Amino acid sequence: MNEGRADVHPVVDIRGLWSVFEKEGQRNVVHQDLSLRVMSGELLSLVGGSGTGKTVLLRQILGLEAPTRGEIEVLGEPAARLGREGAASRVGMLFQHGALFSAFTVLENIELPLRELRTLPPALVREAAMLKLQMVGLKPQDAAKMPADLSGGMIKRAALARALVLDPPLLLLDEPTAGLDPDSSDAFVALLRALHRELGLTVIMVTHDLDTLFELSTRIAVLAERQVIVSGPPREVVAFDHPFVHTFFHGERGQRAMALLDAPPSS
Ligand SMILES: Nc1ncnc2c1ncn2[C@@H]1O[C@H](COP(=O)(O)OP(=O)(O)OP(=O)(O)O)[C@@H](O)[C@H]1O
């Protein structure tokens, strides 16, 4: 994308990242001198085998976890400085099991980040949350529902509305379609694609789902051997010669999903 242009700052800039965990005397090096830049407007998907540190990377970008060594800058600032205060206005996160608070209504859940800011009067908080609720395809009458009364797809939508309520320019998605039935998954993917386009969001997504991956990604980065072994447009990445890439993309499921690359984009 814009990676070559000197006048465009990356939204996320990871340089020389090491993530090392010690457990029962064992050293587990998860990332070793990993570097990755994500430019404005990209929808970058992170793929990699189990334990390659995709979730750890998302948590580090959010500032929830500090790297052992190296730099992570988000929107020009060290990720650690995002802290918890005000972080939601810069980075939105949709957790895989990012359940809603079960004791709050849908609207109260969406309002939460705005209420924590304590800058807007309740009526405006409500109005802003209602706008986001409708933006993700929920209906005004869903606002008063409790999470237990929602389908899986509706829960994802409400959690997405909450992640976007402060209009962050960067959105992180951890397995956004996991646990959804095929129809709900397709509908959620279509919503994500529309929001990415219409809001001009930069998105970093972790997914194992090949349909989601090919439907949405402008770029795919593959984590293996503690680093990003290849990153590029989907077609380039699937042609990369590496055992993980072969297994992941060229199995039977991969062949079916790859037909999406040849199909015109659905809207
Ligand atoms: N706080 C922690 N303490 C010790 N080890 C950790 C910690 N967090 C993560 N790890 C280890 O780091 C490695 C990477 O974990 P991570 O959850 O990021 O993998 P992943 O790529 O998201 O895997 P999956 O695809 O299975 O979700 C794992 O070996 C995990 O055990």
Image (cartoon, rainbow, N blue to C red):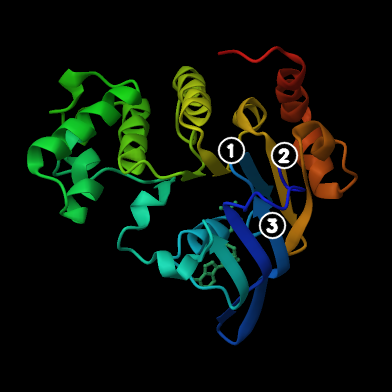
Q: What element carries label 1?
A: loop
Q: Where is residue 226 in the image (x, y as percent from the top left)?
A: 73, 64
Marks 3 and 1, Cα distance to the nearest angstrom?
Answer: 15 Å
Residue designated by label 1:
41
The three-letter code of the residue at mark 1 reads Gly
The kind of residue on which mark 3 rests is Leu
Q: Residues within 10 Å of mark 3 (few under 14, many from 20)?
A: some
Furthest-left residue in this view: 122
Quadrant (top left, top right, bottom left, bottom right) of the N terminus = top right
The residue under the point 14% across, 44% down is 103
Label 1, residues with CA under 10 Å away: few <14, some 14-19, many ≥20: some
Instruction: Tell me the CA gap for discs 2 and 3.
Output: 13 Å
Q: Which of marks 2 and 3 is in front?
A: 2
> Crowding at label 2, few (<14), some or many (≥20) Cα neighbours within 10 Å?
few
Quadrant of the image occupied by residue 209: top right
Q: Residue 215 location in percent, x, y?
A: 63, 25
**Looking at the image, do the residues carrying marks 1 and 2 touch, with CB atoms under 8 Å apart?**
yes
Above or below, 112 against 130 in this view is below
Left or right: where 141 falls relative to 113: left
Q: In which quarter of the image is ligand 1?
A: bottom right
Q: Which amino acid does label 2 sit on?
A: Met
Q: Is residue 120 left or right of residue 170?
A: left
Residue 80, numbered label: none
Q: Is residue 148 visible?
A: no
User: Regarding mark 3 in the picture, which secondary structure is present there?
Assistant: strand
Per the image, the residue denoted by label 3 is: 36
| The label number, if any, that marks residue 1 in the structure image | 2
How far apart, in angstroms, are the residues tagged by discs 1 and 2?
9 Å
Q: In this view, does 246 lie to the left or right of 124?
A: right
Task: Pinpoint residue 49: horizontal percent, then vertical percent.
Answer: 68, 52
